[in-house]
Image: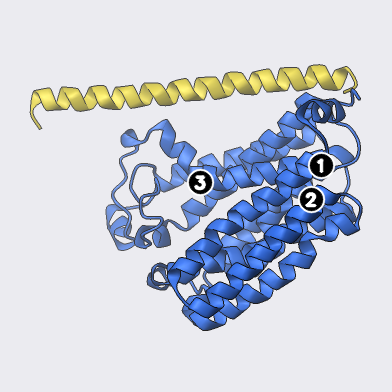
Chain colours: A blue, B yellow
């Protein structure tokens, strides 16, 4: 890429010598990765059956690396819009600390590595799901939907919903109704989570030409959509209880915190201010963490968990 | 850029390159260790 094209896309001239290890770690979107790893681990723990602790650790590592790789490829593809958005302009590529081609090579290499390792070390069903998740995030969400439709996050959200299903498949070697239930929770959780962010970052998305719902349909419509999805999320979050894979602890957490999510969504619609949208965005992260933490807690203490995962108990 | 400033820049570039090389070495060693341990577990019927 020439300097002129870099100027056109708003990316600072690249000085790869300036890049540090931290910049490559930043390409992996570590904050997103933490949620992905956590939900993947929950799927692994909740699944019936046993898996050697080392293979369980490798499965979680592959989920983490795969998610990070998809994030790096996403940053490579979106480098033009990242450069004009306040939230993302300091990322390694738009800031000129990592060359775009290097980021792409980094992402593709790690993606292939994670899928191959998952297949060879754990099983090929989990590897296929990991490949599907990565492909969905890169090709369906990033390349196809993100810049074309306000429903980008609704369909694209499926990519982030795969980890518990991958964790489950790592243990069982199959996809089942229970793992689809865990998938559905994250799938329905994603739109209101990102729309809450888009409500107070609307200007950023508009400047970058990303057709997020508040930009295309307006804030009022977005608030109604958030409430609709929040209302849908509460019963969906209770399906693990109905299916018998979760009990009272999970059910209580899902009901209480789901109720609070619903209340926050109503507040977002009523108050029409950024503060309530920020609160909704922040709490939605805590909500998802809590749901999956409750699921992990219900499957035993750390010692019992290790024994179960390791097939020792 | 003065000679002194250039020397400082060069040493900074070298320091960053060294840390990237070191990180790559650690990643490669970790990869070898993972493949070795997975092989041991799989061969052992885990």
Task: Nearest to the eye among marks 3 and 2: give it.
Answer: 2
Q: In the picture, residue A252 is in which quadrant? A: bottom right
Instruction: Judge left or right: residue A63 versus residue A2.
Output: right
First in sequence: mark 3 vs mark 1: 3
Q: Secondary structure at mark 1?
A: helix
Q: Are marks 3 and 1 on the same chain?
A: yes
Instruction: Determine contact: label 3, label 1, CB under 8 Å.
Output: no
Residue drawn at (91%, 25%) of the image: A313
Label 1 belongs to which residue?
A298
Instruction: Determine contact: label 1, label 2, CB under 8 Å.
Output: yes
Q: Secondary structure at mark 3?
A: helix
Task: Check the residue under mark 2 and report the chain it is in.
Answer: A
Q: Is residue B2 visible?
A: yes
Q: Are marks 1 and 2 on the same chain?
A: yes
Label 2 belongs to which residue?
A250
First in sequence: mark 1 vs mark 2: 2
Cα–Cα span, label 1 and label 2: 7 Å
Q: Residue B18 appears at what percent x and percent y?
A: 38, 21
Cα–Cα span, label 3 and label 1: 40 Å
First in sequence: mark 3 vs mark 2: 3
User: Which disc is residue B19 wearing?
Assistant: none
Label 3 belongs to which residue?
A104
Instruction: Judge left or right: residue A53 versus residue A136.
Output: right
Residue drawn at (9%, 24%) of the image: B3
Q: Is residue A150 visible?
A: no
Instruction: Judge left or right: residue A303 versus residue A272.
Output: right
């Amino acid at each position: 890429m020439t300097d002129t094209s870099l100027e056109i896309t708003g990316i600072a001239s690249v000085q790869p010598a300036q890049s540090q290890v931290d910049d490559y770690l930043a390409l992996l979107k570590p904050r997103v990765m933490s949620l992905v790893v956590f939900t993947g681990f929950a799927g692994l723990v909740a699944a019936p059956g046993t898996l050697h602790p080392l293979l369980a650790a490798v499965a979680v590592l592959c989920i983490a690396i795969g998610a990070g790789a998809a994030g790096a490829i996403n940053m490579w593809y979106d480098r033009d819009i990242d450069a004009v958005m306040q939230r993302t302009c300091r990322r390694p590529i738009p800031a000129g600390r990592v060359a775009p081609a290097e980021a792409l090579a980094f992402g593709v290499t790690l993606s292939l590595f994670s899928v191959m390792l998952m297949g060879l070390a754990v099983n090929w069903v989990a590897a296929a799901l990991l490949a599907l998740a990565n492909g969905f995030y890169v090709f369906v969400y990033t390349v196809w939907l993100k810049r074309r439709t306000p429903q980008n996050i609704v369909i694209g959200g499926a990519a982030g919903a795969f980890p518990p299903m991958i964790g489950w498949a790592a243990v069982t070697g199959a996809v089942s109704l229970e793992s689809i239930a865990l998938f559905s929770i994250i799938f329905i959780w994603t739109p209101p989570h990102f729309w809450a962010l888009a409500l107070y970052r609307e200007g950023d998305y508009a400047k970058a030409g990303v057709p997020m719902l508040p930009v295309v349909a307006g804030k009022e419509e977005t608030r109604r959509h958030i409430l609709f999805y929040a209302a849908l999320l509460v019963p969906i979050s209770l399906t693990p209880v109905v299916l018998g894979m979760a009990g009272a602890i999970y059910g209580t957490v899902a009901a209480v915190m789901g109720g609070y999510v619903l209340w926050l969504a109503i507040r977002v619609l009523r108050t029409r201010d950024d503060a309530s949208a920020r609160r909704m965005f922040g709490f939605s992260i805590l909500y998802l963490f809590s749901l999956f933490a409750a699921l992990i807690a219900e499957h035993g203490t750390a010692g019992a968990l290790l024994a179960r995962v390791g097939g020792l108990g | 850029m003065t000679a002194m400033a250039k020397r400082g820049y060069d040493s900074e570039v070298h320091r960053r390159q060294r840390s990237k090389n070191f990180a790559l070495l650690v990643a490669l060693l970790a990869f070898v260790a993972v493949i070795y341990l997975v092989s041991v577990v799989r061969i052992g019927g885990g």
